[in-house]
Amino acid sequence: MSWTREQRNVTIAAYLGWTLDAFDFFLMVFVLKDIAAEFNTKIPTVAFGIMLTLIMRPVGALIFGWLADKYGRRPTLMVNIACFSLLELLSGFSPNLTTLLVLRALFGIAMGGEWGVGGALTMETVPPKSRGIVSGLLQAGYPSGYLLASVVFGVFYQYIGWRGMFFVGVLPALLVLYVRAHVPESPAFKTLEKKVRPGLVATLKQNIGLSLYAIVLMTAFNFFSHGSQDLYPTFLRVQHGFDAHTVSWITITLNIGAICGGLFFGWFSEKIGRKRAIFIAALIALPVLPLWAFSTTPVLLAAGAFLMQISVQGAWGVIPVHLNEISPDEIRATFPGLVYQLGNLIASVNGPLQASAAEAHGNNYALIMAIVIGIVAVVIAALIPFSRERRGIDMTQSAKEVAAST
């Protein structure tokens, strides 16, 4: 299938947007120990910063999603990227823990907007038959960002310290220039732009069952990703006592697995359907659990982490396209991002919960992570059959029908 230059540019911009957003988020997970030492506090207290970022993401999804549904996907995406880059830079100047926590909360608002706005812009622009693989690519932006953060930590941390890690995080601001120069507005938004549409609240009320189901599903998904990723570097540093270099290459391996999983299952969902692809990917986690959590050597832990993230991000790779396809047309920039981030909000307790439970069990992170992931994999496999299968719907045509009926 031939793509236009605009379709390619939109896909590149959305992928890089989510990659650099995740990069800025994950820079912090590598330096929890160092921030705790500088501000004379414990790791779970600093991990509260991760929780704050996740808590505030629904606010960002709502604000930026509403702006994108009202004024357009493209200008909103540019403002959004500029915001999270600036807040990342300011985090590096924090004179105390309170300031850092406030900045991480504000960063959460900016981070919460990017995924929904970028996803809507892309899914409404690319050819319908390409949506599955593009979905996998977009979601692969998240582990790509984690991978980038792993590399920066492994190579630069010893020279720049934890504050320097945040300073590096201002670089995504350059992406705004690319979006401004090369990315057009979504055709589906242009179709709806001139029409009087029901507001956000009215549309959510009309779709209350779908909204509640999607929030529950995304809560499970966020426990799946954050439960297997956020404290993994701490698990490697604290429980196994590995140095920064070893932690870096294991997390790099983990993220290569995540990217492979997202791309493969995104593509596979085009063949077998979104729901089936998610079901299969989620259940792969169960046989991989022992190798992932209870191995003792760096090589076996890396192998387990690689396979676990094929499962986790394999299931996640289908989510951008699935949520966009089941979303009401009138609020496509808001709905996927909002339900995703509300799921994130509920799952935001994961970091402090896992850290505290692990400390209470003699720093046994392995046991706590294995329990969380085992339960969540089964929950996702049980929930996904109840979703709707709308693989390949024509979003511009669907928007025209909505516009005609209002």
Image (tube, helix red, strand yellow):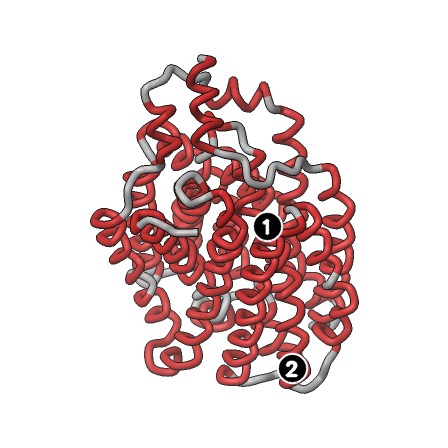
Residue type at mark 2: give it. His
> In the rendered view, does 348 fall on the left or right side of 39?
right
Q: Nearer the viewer, mark 1 or mark 2?
A: 1
Q: Is residue 59 above or below residue 287?
A: above
Q: In which quadrant of the rendered view does residue 301 lie? A: bottom right
Name the residue at the top extreme: 406
**Image position of 378 (left or right of 28):** right
Question: Which residue: 44% across, 63% down?
Answer: 145
Nearer the observer, 288 or 102: 288
Estimate the x, y position of residue 237 in percent, counting from the top left: 58, 78
Above or below, comparing residue 234 to residue 98 in the picture: below
Q: Earlier in the sequence, mark 1 or mark 2?
A: 2
From the image, tell me which residue sits under label 1: 270
The quarter of the picture where residue 315 lies is bottom right
Crowding at mark 2 (Cα within 10 Å: few <14, some 14-19, many 20+): some
Marks 1 and 2, how far apart in space? Answer: 41 Å
